[in-house]
């Protein structure tokens, strides 16, 4: 009753009168169309600018090598598309690896679906990786490189993997030296130290009886929080009853999974470790 007397109920259900669009000012009635037109013009202009950038990016011609893994016409079509734009196909003996700069940069092209199985069959792969002017691209379509829709492979940075024996022999000072080296390398591309799950588990068990192992475990935990060290998901290498893990196969799988990392480093044996650290 009080609500009725105070007109609250009436106000809650009262409808606002609608204004006929014909009584609106002409500027207001045309505003939505004007916004749509402006938006379309902006998109068109952006597309034109992107096309200009793409065309300009290919004024510099490059040499290329396509890793052919089958008789599929895909590879020949890719070659024809690139040669039609003035780019030059080369063979492995024409790579000119090791040079800091060349007249024409070199692009190594793989089909994306071939990366996992064939990425390490690229001729002179390590030499190519060590040559800054060499680029790598993964493609799904023959014109992906020209359209800049390719995947950049072996772009920068890398990762390190140690075998169990090497890891067990590392003292805290060795670990700190390695981390400092990786941090230095990361200034031009992120480097990561990958640890196997089984090794982390062994460190955890040893820290209960060894103060040195506890300090090393704490240091690795800190590095992991800092993003320098990463524990790999549990996989075949971590089966304790399986004997010595196949680290080489594991490294190849990791390279395929982290295809943007330029270098994959496997450390095994004290002499290799010394050489690696001395290189810093």
Image (tube, helix red, strand yellow):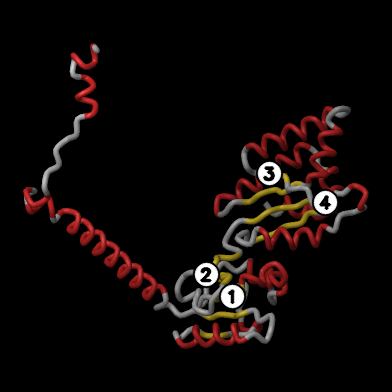
Q: Give the residue at mark 1.
A: 109
Q: What residue is shown at x 85% (from left), y 58% (from top)?
A: 246
Q: CB of mark 1 within 8 Å of CB of mark 4?
A: no
Choose mark 2 or mark 1, whichever is in front.
2
Percent coordinates x, y for residue 54 in the rendering: 39, 72
Q: Secondary structure at mark 3?
A: strand
Q: Is residue 88 left or right of residue 13?
A: right
Q: Earlier along the polypeptide chain: callout 2 or callout 4?
A: 2
Q: Give the residue at mark 3.
A: 229
Q: What residue is shown at x 33% (from left), y 72% (from top)?
A: 52
Q: Quadrant of the N terminus?
A: top left
As drawn, the label of residue 163 is 4
Q: Earlier along the polypeptide chain: callout 3 or callout 1?
A: 1
Percent coordinates x, y for residue 233 in the rendering: 74, 48
Q: Earlier along the polypeptide chain: callout 2 or callout 1?
A: 1
Vertical order, 252 against 7 (above or below): below
Q: Secondary structure at mark 1?
A: strand
Tag 3: Cα neighbours inside 10 Å, few (<14), some, or many (≥20)?
A: many
Q: Give the residue at mark 2.
A: 150
User: In 3D space, how far apart are the residues under numbered discs 3 and 2 (Cα atoms)?
Assistant: 29 Å
Tag 4: Cα neighbours inside 10 Å, few (<14), some, or many (≥20)?
A: some
């Amino acid at each position: 009753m009080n609500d009725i007397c105070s007109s609250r109920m009436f106000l809650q259900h009262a409808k606002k009168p609608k204004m006929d669009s014909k009584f609106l000012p002409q500027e207001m009635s045309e505003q939505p169309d004007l916004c749509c037109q402006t938006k379309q013009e902006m998109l068109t202009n952006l597309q034109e600018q992107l096309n200009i950038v793409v065309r300009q990016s290919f004024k510099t011609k490059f040499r290329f090598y396509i890793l052919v893994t089958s008789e599929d016409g895909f590879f020949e079509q890719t070659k024809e598309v690139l040669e039609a734009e003035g780019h030059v196909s080369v063979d492995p003996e024409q790579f000119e690896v090791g040079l800091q700069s060349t007249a024409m940069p070199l692009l190594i092209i793989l089909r994306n679906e071939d990366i996992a199985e064939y990425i390490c069959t690229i001729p002179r792969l390590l030499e190519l990786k060590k040559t800054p002017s060499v680029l790598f691209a993964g493609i799904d379509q023959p014109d992906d490189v020209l359209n800049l829709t390719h995947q950049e492979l072996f772009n920068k940075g890398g990762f390190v993997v140690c075998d169990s024996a090497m890891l067990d022999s590392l003292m805290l000072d060795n670990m700190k030296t390695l981390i400092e080296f990786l941090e230095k390398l990361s200034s031009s591309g992120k480097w990561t130290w990958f640890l196997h799950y089984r090794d982390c588990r062994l460190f955890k068990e040893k820290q209960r009886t060894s103060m040195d192992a506890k300090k090393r475990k704490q240091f690795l935990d800190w590095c992991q929080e800092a993003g320098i060290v990463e524990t790999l998901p549990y996989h075949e290498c971590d089966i304790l009853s399986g004997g010595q893990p196949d680290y080489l196969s594991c490294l190849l799988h990791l390279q395929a999974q982290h295809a943007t990392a330029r270098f994959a480093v496997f450390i095994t044996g004290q002499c290799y470790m010394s050489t690696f650290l001395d290189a810093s």
